[in-house]
Amino acid sequence: MFRRILSSVAVLAASLLAHGSANAQENWRIGTVVAPPSVLGIMVDEMAASITKTTNGAIKAERFQQPNEQEIAQNVIRGRYEMAFISATGLAPAIPAMGVLNLAYLWSSPEERDYVYDKYVVPLVTDLLAKNGLTLVRTGDGGWMNLFCKAACVSPEQMSGMKVRISPTASDRMMFSRLGANYVTMTLADFFPSLQQGVVDAGSLTFGFYVATPAAAAAPNYVFTRHGHQPMFLVVHTKYWEKLTADQRKAIEASILPTSEIRRRVGEEDVPTEARLKTMGGHAYHLTAEQRAKWAAVVVPGQPEVVQSFGPVAKDIYDAVLKGKEEFRTKAK
């Protein structure tokens, strides 16, 4: 009798343990540099909430803000973070071919960019990320990269000798070298105090992110050079993605904001952001097509050499971009 009781208790304990394990909640961190009140920060919080809701709480996702995108990239590639909402700039040091997407003056318009991305870039990037242990869940949009300075800097000639913080990308080095700037690479965490202390006088950030940082007060002249576009990617470390059921994966993909909605919301952020900058005492400068062309004329000739430095995969992406741009021009005629 005693043995039968012990056996029953053991079966019950095993059943309870299995039930508890099946219903255990997993915490997923979404590594990112963005945070509210920026529209990107708000959207990452929405993505986290939708993942938690869609999985009925099996996964509790949350935004995990870090100041260094290069560290975020390493952490998600190595599986220390489950997910990341990260830019091509952040991924490029770990995956050099991603640097093609940050080439200065690669795009002529948002319409051209979106057409080429959707048809040519996304399939190649999906494969590239997969080879680095990441699954692409959604392509996003971080907006245009623009220049900001302590003093107005609306022409390329004004950059000669200026102390500029650049991101750790070959494209940034090429661009600011051709402009004759006195540039230095540093993390965002180091950049803001350096800007405040006069160690550097200028930098590049997307508009919404810029206004939400100390840079807006330290260097209040924002120039819409639109020299680069900052694509964003919602990625998950593949081993975590493959632990989910097929239904869970489909549900998460369906619940995340579509790329078109992300683009729309980011694109609509400029007007209220400019109004906010004005209340802070800053000023935004909108370049004419002719003014922007002067910047491009200095920088674009340096693109091929940068692409070559990234290796053959980058050349494939760059060639696909050029093909898509030509196709877009033909369709627009």
Image (cartoon, helix red, strand yellow):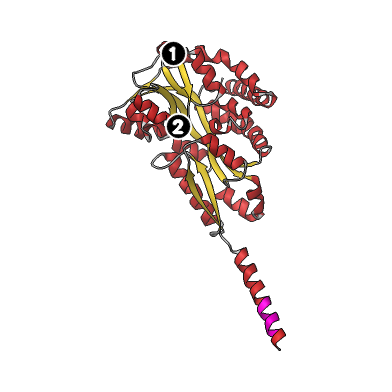
Q: Residues within 10 Å of mark 2 (few under 14, many from 20)?
A: some
At horizontal 58% and vertical 17% (from top left) the residue drawn is 303
Is residue 34 a member of the stretch shown in magenta?
no
The quadrant holding residue 274 is top left
Residue tagged 1: 290
Would you name the residue on which mark 2 appears?
188
Q: Nearer the viewer, residue 262 or 95?
A: 95
Tell me what residue is drawn at x 64 percent, y 74 percent: 13
Label 2 SS:
helix
Question: What's the amino acid at mark 1?
Answer: Glu
Q: Give the range drawn in magenta.
A: 4-10
List x then y, in percent, for residue 220. 33, 25
Nearest-to-viewer mark from 1 and 2: 2
Q: Tell me if 73 is positioned left or right of 184 in this view.
A: right
Callout 2 amino acid: Leu
Is residue 295 something that shows in the picture?
yes
Q: Is the magenta stretch mostly helix, strand or loop?
A: helix
Q: In this view, does 185 lie to the left or right of 217?
A: right
Q: Is residue 37 left or right of residue 133?
A: left
Percent from the top left, x then y, of residue 119? Answer: 62, 32
Location of residue 19 in the rendering, given as x and y in whole percent from the top left corner: 62, 68
Q: Which mark is residue 280?
A: none
